[in-house]
Image: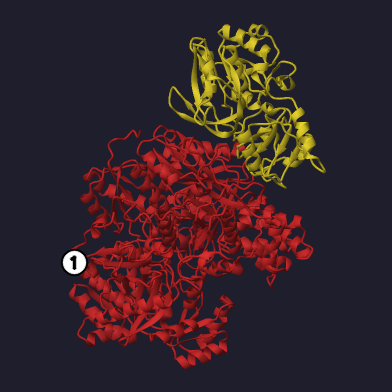
Amino acid sequence: MPKRTDLKRILVIGSGPIVIGQACEFDYSGTQACKALRSEGLEVILVNSNPATIMTDPETADRTYIEPLTVSAVEQIIERERPDALLPTVGGQTALNLAVDLAEQGVLDKYGVKLIGASVEAIRLAEDRLQFKDAMRSIGVDVPESSVVKSLPEALEAAARIGFPLIIRPSFTLGGVGGGIAYNIEEFREICERGLKLSPVHEVLVEESVLGWKEFELEVMRDIADNFVVICSIENIDPMGVHTGDSITVAPALTLTDREYQRMRDAGRRIIQRIGVETGGSNIQFAVNPKDGRMVAIEMNPRVSRSSALASKATGFPIAKIAAKLALGYTLDEIPNDITRLTPASFEPTIDYIVVKAPRWAFEKFPQADRTLTTQMKSVGEAMAIGRTFKEAFLKAFRSLELGSSGRLVGQGAGDEDEVSLQQALGIPTDRRMFAVFRALERGWSLDEIHRLTKIDPWFLTQFQQIVELARAIEAVGGRDLSDDLLREAKRAGFSDADIARLAKIDEESLREHRREIGLLPVYKRIDTCAAEFESFTPYMYGTYETECEAAPTQKPKVMILGSGPNRIGQGIEFDYCCCHAAFALRDEGYETIMVNCNPETVSTDYDTVDRLYFEPLTFEDVMAIVERERSAGGEVSCVVQYGGQTPLKLALPLQAAGVKIIGTAPDSIDLAEDRERFAKLLWDLGIPQAASGTATSPQEAVEVAGSIGFPVVVRPSYVLGGRAMAIVYDTAALERYMRHAVQASPEHPILIDKFLEDATEIDVDALADASGGVVIGGIMEHIEQAGIHSGDSSCVVPPFQLSPAHVATIRDYTRRIARALNVVGLMNAQFAIKDDVVYVLEVNPRASRTVPYLSKATGVPLAKIAAKLMIGRTLAELGLTEDLEVSGSFVKSPVFPFVRFPGVDTLLGPEMKSTGEVMGGAESFGSAFAKAMMGAGQVLPQGGTAFISVNNRDKAAAVPIARDLARLGFKLMATRGTAAYLRAHGIDAEIVFKINEGRPHVGDELLNRRITLVINTPLGRESFFDDKTVRSVAMLQGVPAITTLTGAAAAVSAIEAIRREGLSVKALQDYHQKVG
Amino acid sequence: MVFNTSMTGYQEVLTDPSYAGQIVTMTAPEVGNYGVTTADVESRDVQVAGFVVREQSPIASNWRAEGTLRDYLVSHNVVAIAGIDTRALVRMLRSSGVMRGVIATGRVDPEELVDKARKLPRMEGADLVQTVSCLEPFDYVPPEGDALTLAPSRRGKRRLKVAAYDLGMKYNILRRFAAHGCDVTVYPAKTPAAELLATKPDGVFFSNGPGDPAALDYVIANAREVIESDVPTFGICLGHQVLGLALGARTFKLKFGHRGGNHPVKELRTGRVEITSQNHGFAVDPDSLPSGVEVTHVNLYDGTIEGLRHASRPVFCVQYHPEAAPGPHDADYLFAQFLDAMEAR
């Protein structure tokens, strides 16, 4: 029994929106924690601003608050709910920092709320670099030499003492924001200045470089009785200097002798004791000098983390769930191991396979960003793969990344790369370095040389060399002479059929046929925490080429849900949320559910979510092999492809062609909606207006099409998500430039060209449709920003706040007719634009969309779950849904951007999606809801001060009422010359300020002097591009809201007004939707 | 044929005399990565009869490495095989129990090999200690400690003299005694107890070793004499089984034994859980314990006895390996506990 009987109600804090460094791993851990606490009979109160999470489903907690993660909002929640305790360790650094703030501001004391899992002292000790180092020394654990400084002169002094290269780490910033590596005094000065600014306590650590040392992590746990276990060791293939989130990592550690490993384990125990984590899990990072084995502790996170999610998936040991139970006073030996059932959680998992994690970056979205990998994390997602050998896991991880032809490791071709540039590509860690390693190996560079440049351990380099040699052997013999032995060796080393076919110059499908003939098929092994020492009861599996298969498929009818793979911009947690809901719904309906996914951060890859989990890459080869294995016992396998974004959609047609039953909307309908010409014809037949459009496969054709449509046009490749390579083009020259770039991006598919509807209002609709023609509209979401900004980057509100009833009726009508015409069964998303009183269809996607979770939270109706039931033949009427859904109150979704990670990248929005996550704000009025959404997204709207306004000529007239409102609300106005003159002409006084290139003090100076509290800046066009960009960048670094659209500005003004008028209150989802929960 | 679930420490496993006569497979699939080093050996030779892995490392990558695992096995004339579905093998051993096995290459007839395996002597009733025990007594001279050596929780208040029965003793037991400030004299397994006791040791130790404890009547007889002398006595693994037998308990063969570095063991007095290093195929039968013998530790996986103590005499022993090597150091306190017992006299 738990020792603590004083706890009845627990407040759990989530991690907020998905940002770089904090992704869906915290939905996984938070959901696990909530479930674990409730299973112990506790009431859970949850707060998280991110609606696209399973944890904010009303079923996950007793009371669910989708509210900003601020002290004032959480204090209101505490006041209403009176929890006994707060669990701050499952919501990332965001939750820890918020817990510290709540404690420091006396909120926890005031309401008698205890912190469980980690104390404020432990959080501080782990986070404060100086205290941490002292603590380490006091327990005999070595640390790099360092100095904590609070000013530049102090920093320079430290640099002189320790010597270059130096690592700079600001205190208390998430994922190391603002940190860096300096090789010279200039770089050092720059990074220190930035770090001092970004650190909330204006403090940075200047540290001895351990660059190039080997990097290891331990995931450890401790209980109230001081029992200690290591769940997993992780070795980073990229040595020290690259953030572990940006490193390719492997579990278990592979190059440590037992004596070295045990020394690390001993240090881990002392560290968690010394930091004072009484119960729960921690992540500890170590560096080991490859020359003499000197080991230093780098950092410790007294909470669950991205690495602990990885460790949980890598071992089958659910760290967050166990941590939650430990927080209640259980000891490890009192908690059973779910997988073996008979043995307790007080053990150390041992694994008989190798796990490799590979990060995925989004630099293609931020061409100006520096691709160098440093101590500051830049990747947006990751894929994990499991194999019986390192080579197999490594190659599976890389194909899981879905990088297309740019993801090829072997046979990249030499190109015209010279020696020096290859040396550079090896020496400077970037997202492309691993590919350079393989090019160097293919050129025959020695391992010593590659090691010298990359510092990657020779053991890994030798493995890569073996891969290259195998590839060479296949290439040399070619398809006709490819022996079964060599084929078997290649498959066992993790080569995909596509790799082998390409190298041997044969057809992939006939290769697969040959494999079937000779019985060279993957088997599935179980992940069981114990290397088969005990029987496992959870079908959590990975594929490999061995002799014995443990899949043991059943004869039951089953539905396989294909997940969305690694997170990327445009395809993130929203799709994982939908996949989980499909699993929940279909399990309810009595189907055996099977999940296939390769993203370790997710809830979908929790073995609790589905009946059978395959942790495998989402390629046709891997998915089809699972289908064949699952079918082998006689149970029919149906497949859900419309929930995981583009990843499974790309597989829909090939799977169907291979005889797999796809449930829900037919792949042909999905294709029809994607195919510009077919879709245009459908709309024409339906009499529904669409912006003029065409397709082109060559630059000449594009120019012709654009000419007939008329500029401006929106151009994009077909079959992309998140507006990849999407652009608005105003003239022929720009179009030609674009075509050269974009056609490269997607050679198989034509380029879509649409008339761009300038200044149109954009609307998103999600609808449910059943096989009998029933259609229910889930919600009509009005974008705050006008058309032209990617819908994922636009704030939106439900219900619409400015649409006329007539337009709403038209949108409903169009949506219904299109859904019926496409024979949609399940979910459909449609985007509309209204310009000059006409409703146009922009696009229709008969699949789960990014807005489904948000809309489900706003309406209280789980759309994805219902849609899954429709797919297996239920009707809307049967499920009690006959009317379009309504919401009570107003719900705003706002995007969150990663710009702070990419200094120098413009924050201007466009048709290419750039946001990583979203938040929701709910309230009675639009203004309050928008204010909450902005707050949730980290934009604190000022209540006074000076607003800086600079808008382009087209926007000047529309800026007048906004300026007038701001003045009325007591803001002082500041404007550039042109804008100020225009405002004065309309009777509004504004102080004139220099543009950055006009003289000093200019607007940048005023921002730095903190005279400006709000920036409204619409793009002025090419000539002043750099000026605008600087203003926006400086504002961002100063934490001043910078709004780049006038509709956004108007919404911000109404939000400021609403806060004044109403203040902000909090409300649980269960109170919005009385029928749920 | 047995399996070991440690993810590191293959060299310690290979050289552990308790594995004499056994073919060992590691559940960890990548073996040999960090090579071999003389500092990590647990006895004077490679002891396993054969070694089975999924994937062998082509190189040795570690600052401590002196050579590759492959060369090491070749130079010690130990047969090894790679490329095996070791997980399938482990599952077979788990469900059918440990069995006799043969490693062969080339054109072989499976039937013939099975026949060959069947003809091998069984582990039950086998005295393998004779093959691994030292031939002459010697005083242990410890090597220099290094940065990787665990600091002991305390050292003896005076130099303590330990007389150790070598039933196949791992070097790290000796290293741990030395680290705790003990001088150890090592005796062949057959040395009469009287001879040991005549040297007036502060404590007597019964080491780990291979085979069936019940076959060791001469060691059991010596153990009885030592117990009755009231000289503080400590035993590890086979030593623990022998002491159990000497105290009047019985032993039995486990289906597939405990071999690895992750078993949880609970110390009943404190309730603390230790993660332990394990290597044994036999265990003391809890139903056979005479009165006056107390169970101090149990295995949380299967409830088997992991530690015993005599209620009135200074005798205690554990089934697992507090000296680790390979494995966690959680149970190193037992050496200090032996210091306590010796100093109390």
Left or right relative to A936: residue A299? right
Residue A528 image-quadrant placement: top right
* Image coordinates for residue A170, horizontal then vertical, percent: 42, 55
Residue at screen point 27% across, 81% down: A959
- State whether residue A106 is above or below residue A330: below
Q: Residue A642 or B303: which is nearer the viewer?
A: A642
Residue at screen point 55% across, 89% down: A701
Dot 1 falls on which chain? A
* Image coordinates for residue B87, horizontal then vertical, percent: 63, 42
**Chain whose colour in the figure is red:** A
* Image coordinates for residue A700, horizontal then vertical, percent: 57, 90
Colour mode of the rendering: by chain
- State whether residue B160 is above or below residue A458: above
Residue A1036 image-quadrant placement: bottom left
Q: Residue A780 or B168: which is nearer the viewer?
A: A780
Left or right relative to A40: residue B241? right
Residue B111 seen from this side = yes
**Chain whose colour in the figure is yellow:** B
Q: Amino acid at mark 1?
A: Arg
Residue bearing mark 1: A1060
Tally the numbered discs.
Answer: 1
Q: Quadrant of the N terminus of chain A?
A: top left
Q: Residue A342 or A1062: which is nearer the viewer?
A: A342
Residue B159 seen from this side = no
Q: Quadrant of the C terminus of chain A?
A: bottom left
Residue at screen point 50% across, 62% down: A639
Q: Secondary structure at mark 1?
A: helix
- State whether residue A877 is above or below residue A80: below
Residue at screen point 57% across, 17% down: B234
* Image coordinates for residue A851, horizontal then vertical, percent: 37, 67
Quick one: which residue is furthest to the bottom in this view? A708
Left or right relative to A805: residue A1035? right
